[in-house]
Amino acid sequence: MKLFENNNPDSNEKGIHPLHQVLEEFSLENSGRDVFHHIGTLLPGLRFGGQGKGNCSILLTGKKLIFRTKHSEMFLDCSTKKYMSIYFYYSDFFQVVKNNRAKVLDFKVMLRSLKINNRTISCRTDILTKSEMKSLIQEGPIALDLDYSKTDQFKLSEDKNKVFYLANGGKRILEDEMIRDSEKFEILLKKYNIDRHEILDLIKSKMKDSSK
């Protein structure tokens, strides 16, 4: 696929410089600064570097957005039309969302920039095939199966994945996500002899079980 052309058939951006052409658009719910709180979960695994492309990335998988650093990742539900990887610096993204109280964040992805509402940060965007995306996902700290013909970790059934809510905020969190987070923190806290079960118990102490 040629990068220097308008690849969006629904766009009217004729004659626009290739670097300013919008390659993809999507929106994320941000009530209560949800996006800021979500990306905060990446901090324990954040490492500077990233081969010159930035130390954070977003993978557009078609059905999910995967936010990734070197040693951590999380995902959000979001439909997109193209498979892409967007590399940027975590601190740039953090500064945009930390005080943004808009209820919805609208993203416009360009070749060298990512626009979030009225703010823009530098990035590098790569357009990928589905097979390239699946390979890239498998390289991450949480390998996820993107073959939608199989049982997908993105679609764990409610009976296998209990629903909890933050006791003081009402935010919905699945038990599977809590387990994965406890496993990540176990690695970071290993020298203190703190295991994942203790961490999971602490997390659950801050939650309300939806079945009760």
Image (tube, rainbow, N blue to C red):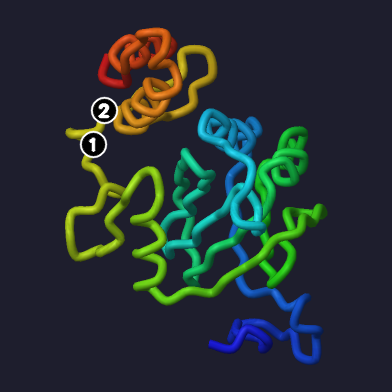
Q: Is residue 118 above or below residue 84?
A: above
The residue pinned by badge 1 equals: 158
SS label for mark 1: loop
Q: Position of residue 149 (x, y in %)?
A: 19, 65
Nearest the eye: 191 or 185: 191
Quarter holding the C terminus?
A: top left
Q: Residue at x 59, y 86 (%)?
A: 9
Q: Position of residue 97 (x, y in %)?
A: 71, 40
Nearest the eye: 140 or 200: 140
SS label for mark 2: loop
Image mark for residue 192: none
Q: Position of residue 68 (x, y in %)?
A: 51, 47
Q: Residue at x 58, y 38 (%)?
A: 47
Q: Amino acid at mark 1?
A: Glu
Nearest the eye: 52 or 151: 52
The residue pinned by badge 2 equals: 162
Q: Residue at x 62, y 68 (%)?
A: 125
Q: Pointer 1 and pointer 2: residues touching (CB < 8 Å)?
A: yes
